[in-house]
Amino acid sequence: FLTLGIESSCDETSAAVIKDGKEVLSNVIASQINLHRKFGGVVPEIASRKHVELINPVIEDALEEAGVDYEELSLVAVTYGPGLVGGLLVGIAAAKAIAYAHNIPLVGVNHIEGHIYSNFISHPEIEPPLLCLTVSGGHTDLLYFEELGSYQILGRTKDDAAGEAFDKVARVMEIGYPGGPAIDKLAKEGDSQAIDLPRPLIYDDNYDFSFSGLKTAVLNYINQKKQKGEEVPQADLAASFQQAVVDVLTAKVFKAAQDKGVKKVLLSGGVSANSHLRRELEEKLDELEIKLYYPQPKLCTDNAAMIGTAVYFKYQLTGEIAPYSLNANPNLKLG
Ligand code: ATP
Ligand code: MG
Ligand code: FE
């Protein structure tokens, strides 16, 4: 059973061929990071034009690498939201054209479900009940799965997403784009206890998150240092900021894991690549004999393999296919 996955919701144009929902035959990712770096963030207009240029070659490459012809495909899977509307439309148009021309069922999927299912590629044995924390550029969602395909949203961010906080802090620190990997690296040389930063909502009796106050605290710290004519201890600041984010995420996941009595927790989204988050959460959950799963690095950030896998599982469960009128939904919500 071969699924062609297509992803173009942000600044990665990606296509993948997935066998039986878990074996990645190819996963081609054309990243536009270098194109957007000088703007310090993704410029939607530039992104959509680049997707138009890249989508067909990327799909062709994915099929060639997998050694698969269009005729052999069983399913075409595409992200239809959330994301940038221009980019989404490019992927959807390509997916529809292939599905129509070769008479293959078309299935649309939520990008965040893709992130969640990226864990099933490395670990197809995963079974509910489980918790999943998605920490990405646009989302911080804590979900409880009693069974596959039905989840309860326990909490989410009230303002900035975790990845967004990494990116914004890296920007004011002027250490590179995207911010997550830059902070992750710099933090290794710093002292995570050096600077006292807030841990928003950490002891609140809910599963909500908030990161914009933490970002402002970092900004204020930098401004105070500059006013006093003192140098900003960059590595210590990166480590202290990262520690604050990790402390909050770990505390909330730990509390939810206890409340729900699960034995499995999944991490997903770009921030799940963070080495410190993985280590601290793994150690903490170990106290409860809970196993932590996270995707391999290439599958943490945007890619089409996760889209193919998510759709494979969804299709096996429901058999639902999308009409040719499938449209982009930039604000698509989970559930
Ligand atoms: P969404 O999935 O919510 O639509 P997105 O697709 O832009 O948003 P992802 O591709 O999942 O987000 O992840 C990108 C984010 O992950 C960026 O904010 C980036 O800084 C962050 N990130 C990547 N690697 C790391 C890392 N090692 N540590 C922390 N953050 C990281
Ligand atoms: Mg991206
Ligand atoms: Fe994403």
Image (tube, rainbow, N blue to C red):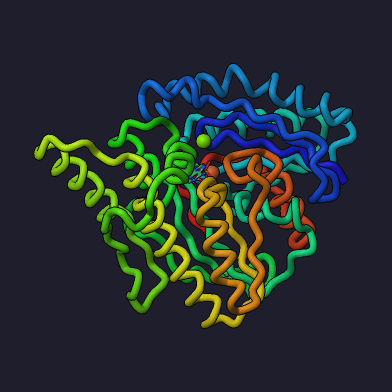
* Residue for point 65% across, 40% down: 298
* Residue for point 74% across, 39% down: 76
In the image, residue 247 above or below residue 206: above
The x, y position of residue 118, in whole percent, is: 67, 50
Residue 279 appearing in the image: yes
The x, y position of residue 203, in whole percent, is: 34, 75
The x, y position of residue 165, in whole percent, is: 36, 47
Image quadrant containing the C terminus: bottom right
Q: Quadrant of residue 175?
A: top left
The x, y position of residue 130, in whole percent, is: 63, 71
* Residue for point 56% across, 59% down: 279
Residue at the limit of the structure toward the top, as seen here: 53
Q: Nearer the viewer, residue 203 or 193?
A: 193
In this image, 145 relative to 102: left or right?
left
* Residue for point 47% across, 71% down: 154
In the image, residue 154 above or below residue 216: below
Residue at the limit of the structure toward the left, as seen here: 227
Q: How many numbered discs, if any?
A: 0
Q: Nearer the viewer, residue 231 or 245?
A: 231
In this image, 149 relative to 197: left or right?
right
Q: Nearer the viewer, residue 120 or 15?
A: 120
In this image, 85 relative to 51: left or right?
left
In the image, residue 67 above or below residue 124: above
Residue 324 appearing in the image: no
